[in-house]
Amino acid sequence: MAWTPEDLERAIAALVAEKDPQEGVSKRAFDLASEIEKLVSQKKLTQRWREEHTLFVPPDEGFRPTKYEVIPITVAQAKGFVLEHHYLGSFASCRLATGLYESGGKLVGVAVFGVPAREAVAHYTSGELSETSGTELNRFVLLDEVPYDAETWFLARAFKMLLEKKPDIQVVISYSDPVPRYSTSGLLVMPGHLGIIYQAFNAAYVGSTKAEGTWLDAEGKSIGARLLSKIRHGEVGQDYGIERLLAAGAPARRRGESAEAWVERSLREGPFRRIRHPGKHTYLWPLGPTKRERKRIASLFPEAIGYPGDPQLKRKAREQRARKYGRS
């Protein structure tokens, strides 16, 4: 049975009033998110999703693998599931989608591997590998009815399927967003997470993406910078972006109004707010048929640092930046 702590909801709602207009989210919100992650890391809770909202599942009788199977699913199947249940309410690119099914045939989880951000693979492999050699685990969703401890079992089989279906893939990238998300009414949408599941699945943690401003709609869902850029410049994917903005409450485009002007006016007049985002935690996995091959690929990664939550993380991160940029 899923548990949504009422005191957590009230705390998040109270934090809305404390929101710093420049920083976007108060320090207490981050502290609260850290406490939630601590409970997850201690195996007292695990995060689940249903109808775009976060739920938490306490330990129960545990996950029974014999009752489940993992198989490839179509893009349409994955998209329908993700749009219904993931907090972002959006579907990214897809190179392969895998589904977690109960023995009765019900789809209860989805893992989607898509196209990574441009230059991401080269950036994280010292320029040795190209974009086609990597993929991003961009959606990983399990329903609240899935028993505790199913995540790593599902991921192991999804990665094995990825290797079989896409043998050219050598690197898997994924990100975790530490920023709590809430609607303008104060409803908790996502408490922020450090990537505990990725840590449990032995990912290499290589730091955070750069800090930047992020736009949110009234429901606390992100309006990505890349999506806005596609609209501004008329790139492939702009139609979805336009639909996304309109559905979120953007004003209709005026006759003769340029795409760039419409985007700026929408962000100014629509129910959107901008927050300062500290960057997403970045995790990498090597993918290959043998341990030797995986070790070779992993050798291309940046030096791994302590997982978020490690008391030595800040010191290690400063040292890494100093080595890379010549300053602390």
Image (cartoon, rainbow, N blue to C red):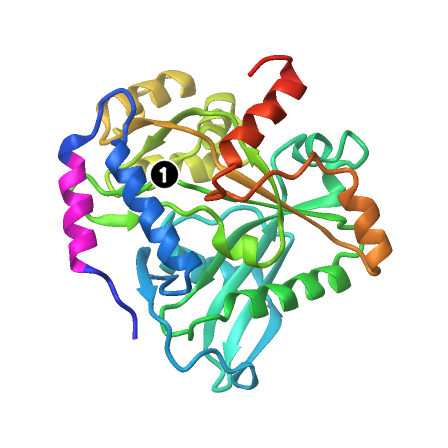
- Check if residue 9 falls in the magenta segment: yes
Residue 276: percent from left, percent from top: 35, 25
Residue 220 appears in view: no
Q: Nearer the viewer, residue 8 or 222?
A: 8
Q: Is residue 319 above or below residue 64?
A: above
Point out residue 52 in the picture as x, y percentages from the top left corner: 33, 55
Residue 147 in sight in this render = yes
Per the image, is 192 magenta?
no
For this orientation, the residue located farthest to the top is: 326
Classify the position of the C terminus by image quarter: top right
Is 177 on the left-hand or right-hand side of 21? right
User: Looking at this view, is 77 or 160 the one in front?
Assistant: 160
Instruction: Report x, y in % for residue 321.
Output: 60, 22
Residue type at mark 1? Answer: Val
- Residue 61 vs 322, above or below: the answer is below
Q: Residues within 10 Å of mark 1 (few under 14, many from 20)?
A: many
Closer-to-camera residue (58/315): 315
Say which residue appears at 56% left-offset and 86% top-offset. Answer: 66
Indicate the secondary structure of the residue bearing disc 1. Answer: loop
Q: Main secondary structure of the magenta part?
A: helix
Residue at 57%, 68% (x, y): give it. Answer: 154
Q: Nearer the viewer, residue 162 or 41?
A: 41
Quadrant of residue 53 in the image?
A: bottom left
What residue is shown at x 16% (from left), y 55% (from top)? 7
Could you tell me which quadrant the N terminus lies in?
Answer: bottom left
Please give the name of the residue rendered at 55% of the width and 58% of the height, measured from the top-left corner: 200
Magenta residues, start to end: 6-16
Q: Which residue is mark 1?
A: 179
Horizontal side of residue 147 vs 155, given as left or right: left
Q: Could you tell whether 153 is left or right of 211 in the image?
A: right
